[in-house]
Image (cartoon, rainbow, N blue to C red):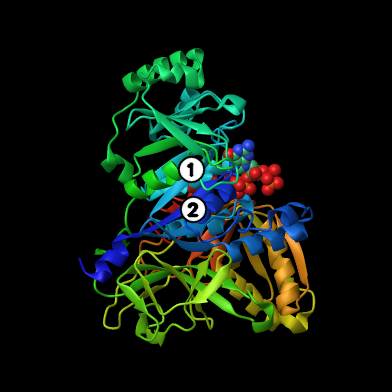
Amino acid sequence: MSKYEAEIKRRRTFAIISHPDAGKTTLTEKFLLYGGAIAQAGQVKGKKNTRAATSDWMEIEKQRGISVTSSVMQFQYEGFCINILDTPGHQDFSEDTYRTLMAADSAVMVIDGAKGVEAQTRKLFKVCAMRDIPIFTFINKMDREARDPFELCEELEHELGIDTYAMNWPIGCGREFMGVYDRQNRKVIHFTSNTNARAATATQIEPDDPALADLIGAGKRDQLVDEIELLDGASCDFDLDRVRHGKLSPVFFGSALTNFGVEPFLEEFLRMTTAPLARRAGDEVVDAFDDDFSAFVFKIQANMNKAHRDRIAFMRVVSGKFEADKEVYHVQEGKKIRLSRPQQLMAAEREIIEEAYAGDIIGVFDPGIFSIGDTLCAPGKKFAFDPIPTFAPEHFERIRSVDTMKRKQFLKGVEQIAQEGAIQIFKTPYSGMEEVIVGVVGTLQFDVLEYRLRSEYNVELYKEGLPFEYLRWIVREDEEAPPLKEEDLLLPGDAKLVEDYKGNQLLLFASQWSIQWVTERNKGLKLAEFGGAKF
Ligand code: G4P
């Protein structure tokens, strides 16, 4: 195997998803700790301080802080080169999360053992499931009172629609959490608490060893033997192929805070998950091991450093090797470019890099040329990766600049922020540019927009809430057909025809009922829930 192949093969790029507070940060920190990327827990985010943030204002700063400093972290562990993609937990930032997930090859889903599947888990899971990427479940906080493990597995299957396979089985919970039974090796791993050390101290013992009763008590031993029997009889077979296609989720029980089962989880996960996956570009499939470099942009973050007005485009390397001094072809602009100041994030630090391989995430300085979903490839190649889907916003406002003299800054700011993908902007057909309709997935994005327009573009906003809650893209089957006008459609009073800035036409609705009304009365009108593309 060449060095080039070996480098790609050892890469693992995954996202950690969870409902807020399930323990994503704690687990991430433990991973980084094992990899030697940080020296002590608590370095990923200044959690104590940010926790004190109560106002929306601080919340915005916090969220931006989080997505900037820890959007992706690379570290080494036992020969693997690991890229962890962080996904902001706050539900108003789910759009950002969705895009980040597009750059991942697998996901680790952290579940709170006392709470089970929560709202945000469901949403994020859905996105991972659409791409059929492997999903590994870590049921956390077993050192606290937790729900029955059978019930938790059943809930995962029932609520998320994925089969599960318990890789290990907890022995007790809360203060009585004594360890786990490793099903593959048929061994009990008995833990002794060790909060600060690299790993919990574990003793391995066979389940039929008489000494087990001394270790965990006869009652717990009997219960374990019964549960294993039940588990072996009831659960489906372990099938790595189904895991790799996102059909079967391996489940691990543990406790991130006290290190119970974290390292075995990381090791098993790295062994089972895939090396960088191929990506679709129309009819082509671009394999990670292809000789030529290719990448796609999945995140743009402007003004990370306000003093420099910089804008960073984050891209996932899909194939080949990136070399800092080589020209690449930017497909959407039709131009050859050199990517300037390529960098990677290591825990909280940024580092300029000379090379990167398929699976890696790099950030490059963006002079305003990139959009989310753009493709970069070797000069001479001309494919474009399937676009990243846009999710339908659920909240809408009409906005304009209070000061009409600032129209230009207003538009520039709104357009730039829209290019980052945090908001979507629309206009009514044939209207001027004084006012813009803004759609967001979470209302906090309105505050972010207002705050950023004021602080970065010096524009005060006039805002007016709109009653719409649903948006549908009008599917145009005939590309040549002229755009629709309102009078071409039968619309109720609470629906509105708008256009985005790429010329797509859309309808805004105040209710589900109204969508149904329009679909029934406008024969031939096709509406789509996601803009952009297939997954
Ligand atoms: P998140 O990123 O998913 O939002 O969760 P985070 O890791 O920040 O964890 C949320 C809270 O749960 C934290 O407590 C954290 O210490 C705690 N926690 C995480 N894993 C475990 C675990 O395995 N067992 C127990 N008992 N607690 C766990 P906090 O008090 O809110 O924050 P902090 O003051 O400890 O930072």
Badge count? 2
Residue 312 location in percent, x, y?
54, 75
Q: Is residue 468 left or right of residue 316?
A: right
Q: Residue drawn at (41%, 14%), measured in percent from left and top?
A: 226
Vertical comparison of 468 with 516: above or below: below
Q: Identity of the amino acid at label 1?
A: Val
Residue 385: which quarter of the image? bottom left
Residue 224: which quarter of the image? top left
Tell me the element at label 2. helix
Q: Is residue 289 left or right of residue 36?
A: left
Q: Is residue 384 left or right of residue 473?
A: left
Residue 466: which quarter of the image? bottom right
The quadrant of the picture showing ligand 1 is: top right
**Mark 2 = which residue?**
34
- Whether the residues at callouts 1 and 2 have beta carbons within 8 Å, the answer is yes
Q: Nearer the viewer, residue 401 or 317?
A: 317
Q: Nearer the viewer, residue 35 or 97?
A: 35
Q: Identity of the amino acid at label 2?
A: Tyr
Specify whether residue 229 is in view. yes
Q: Nearer the viewer, residue 58 or 5?
A: 5
Q: Residue drawn at (48%, 66%), measured in percent from left and top?
A: 504
Vertical comparison of 152 with 65: above or below: above
**Mark 1 = which residue?**
262
Specify whether residue 431 is in view. no
Q: Nearer the viewer, residue 360 or 481?
A: 360
Tell me the crowding category of disc 2: few under 14, some 14 to 19, or many 20 or more residues within 10 angstroms, Cα based.
many
Tell me the distance, in whole angstroms, between the alpha carbons under discs 1 and 2: 10 Å
Residue 481 location in percent, x, y?
39, 68
